[in-house]
Image (cartoon, helix red, strand yellow):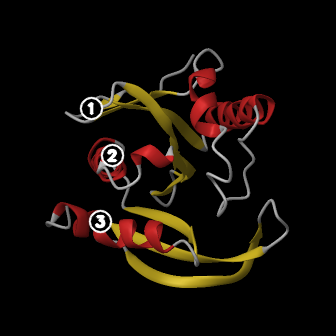
Amino acid sequence: MNNTPTLENERVILSALTLENYEKLIPIASQEKLVKYSPTDIETPSSLKNYAEIALQQLAAGTSIPFIIYDKKQKVYAGSTRFMHINKINKVLHIGSTWIGREFHGTGLNTQMKKLMLDYAFQTMDFEKVEFRVDERNIASRKAVEKLGCTLEGVLRKDVYLLDGFKRNTCCYGLLREEWLNGNK
């Protein structure tokens, strides 16, 4: 039923997010305002379960592949990420809905998992472009995707309502397969 690949390198394991394992993320997801730049509520066990259920509905529809993140260095679950807005016809997908606990910020974990996902998207899935959507104010996330070689392609003004009612501007970043394969790693 679930054909989510397991992606792994020396630092991280990305495996299928399921209704059997999402609870391992409750301690991380409950960190106050962890996803303050996202329209998603994950802070309570019930909202985290809803998050997992929606991700699995998208998986069943073929538009998303959600992962649970395991940090091999710290030997603990760290958060979640996914391939999303999968467009097989145009060979474009997004990497998003990514969140990791604050204790993992700045440790290199995010870079290692993004490299795994980009390699898989371009080489195994045969996609031609990967996009990232980031709140304009989220400087750390913007720098992280720029470090991967992504290009800012534009800003969608007043694009998404956040949980606090603020309507954010969304930066649209793109990375082409040839850019990734030609050394933007």
Residue corresponding to mark 1 = 73
120 and 146: which is toward the camera: 146
Q: Earlier in the sequence, mark 3 or mark 2?
A: 2
x 80%, y 73%: residue: 166
Q: Which structural element holds mark 3?
A: loop
The answer to whether the residues at label 2 and label 1 have Cβ atoms under 8 Å apart is: yes
Q: Relative to 82, does residue 158 appear above or below in the rendering?
A: below
x 38%, y 54%: residue: 127
Q: Which structural element holds mark 2?
A: helix
Residue corresponding to mark 3 = 148
Q: Which structural element holds mark 1?
A: loop
In percent of width and height, residue 146 lies at 35, 73
Residue corresponding to mark 2 = 109
User: Of circles 1 and 3, which is in front?
Assistant: 1
Q: Earlier in the sequence, mark 1 or mark 3?
A: 1
Q: Earlier in the sequence, mark 2 or mark 1?
A: 1
For the residues marked 3 and 2, what is the alpha-carbon distance in whole angstroms? 13 Å
159 and 21: which is toward the camera: 21
In percent of width and height, residue 121 lies at 36, 48
For the residues marked 1 and 3, what is the alpha-carbon distance in whole angstroms? 21 Å
Q: Relative to 3, does residue 68 appear above or below in the rendering?
A: below
Q: Residues within 10 Å of mark 3 (few under 14, many from 20)?
A: some
The numbered dot on residue 112 is none
Residue type highlighted by circle 2 = Leu
141 and 52: which is toward the camera: 141
